[in-house]
Image (cartoon, rainbow, N blue to C red):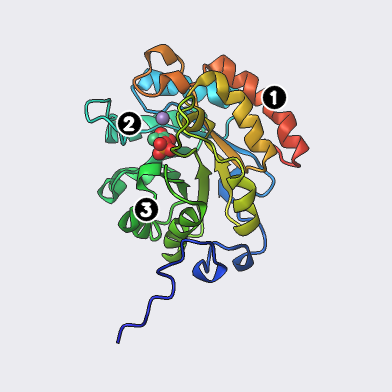
Amino acid sequence: MLSKDKYSACAEFSPEALKKVIRGAHPEDSVVSIGTHAIGGGVLGVIAGPCAVENEKQIIAIAKTVKAAGASFLRGGAFKLRTNPYSFQGIGSKGIKLLAAAKKETGLPLVSEITEIRQFEYFDGIDIIQVGARNMQNFSLLKELGKCGKPVLLKRGLASTVTELLMAAEYIMDGGNVNVILCERGLRTFETFSRSTLDIAAVPWLKQRTHLPVIVDPSHAAGDASLIPAVAKAAVAAGADGLMIEVHNDPEHALCDGEQSLTPDAFSALMIALKKYAELEGKRL
Ligand code: PEP
Ligand code: MN
């Protein structure tokens, strides 16, 4: 006989519906680490790189500059989820190979987005698998990633509550994967000056309730490079364990999200400023 689903109406936060992500399940802050690089546990992990991998020259140049500026992870989308079918869709598995070349050159661990589970065969060399906002509730993908043996960076959906974000993370943890990072990246609201409205209070709210590291993506929230430094500082002041920031060596000609990408110089300046903010929060870069 099927038992009544006592969690079916749990849109409101309830610790009973979240067995593994809640603080009580793991009193210490969880830390996701790849070698000597970490996110959480007193380390502000900075993931930087282009929205999309475009070609070898581009990704290697960006990897070198973000590394020199002090970033600890390199990001780059190979498989892109684009709103418009005629927009640049990413270079696919070739992009993953180019990321591996950038890692060889710089030693930076890699973060890249998977958009469907059959791409997993290409992700051997990727250290942290990203689930994008549009896939936050792709439950079959989350279940597979629960068994994949690699850390997962889970981005909050454009119209998802923080409780739904925690439940999505619970899907991954329930599969046995303890390495999950949550990412606040802004919400769809009536406001149009920014690409998305960053829910800054979500950071302390999540930190109160979960042991998982919480990072902020100011790039997709603000959607405007001139706003990123201030928003990144605010995220650190709000208690974020890390940041994901888009950087491009030639933002004007970027194939994706150039308008929100920092130049290498702007990123280096931001990293210097962030050091002080991190220290105030008792964290190191
Ligand atoms: C990204 O990080 O490249 C991205 C597409 O972000 P989001 O899923 O948050 O829109
Ligand atoms: Mn992007």
Q: Is residue 255 left or right of residue 33?
A: left
Q: Residue at x 38, y 61 (%)?
A: 147
Q: Is residue 284 above or below residue 56?
A: below
Q: Quadrant of the N terminus?
A: bottom left
Residue 27 % position (x, y): 67, 64
Q: Which of pointers 3 and 1 lies earlier in the amino acid sequence? A: 3
Give the farthest residue toward the left.
86
Residue 128 visible to an observer of this rendering: yes
Ligand 2, by image quadrant, is top left
How many marks on residues? 3
Of circles 3 and 1, which is in front? 3
Identify the residue under disc 3: 137
Quick one: 42 or 209, which is closer to the camera?
209
Which mark is drawn over residue 95? 2
Which mark is drawn over residue 273? 1
Residue 37 % position (x, y): 59, 41
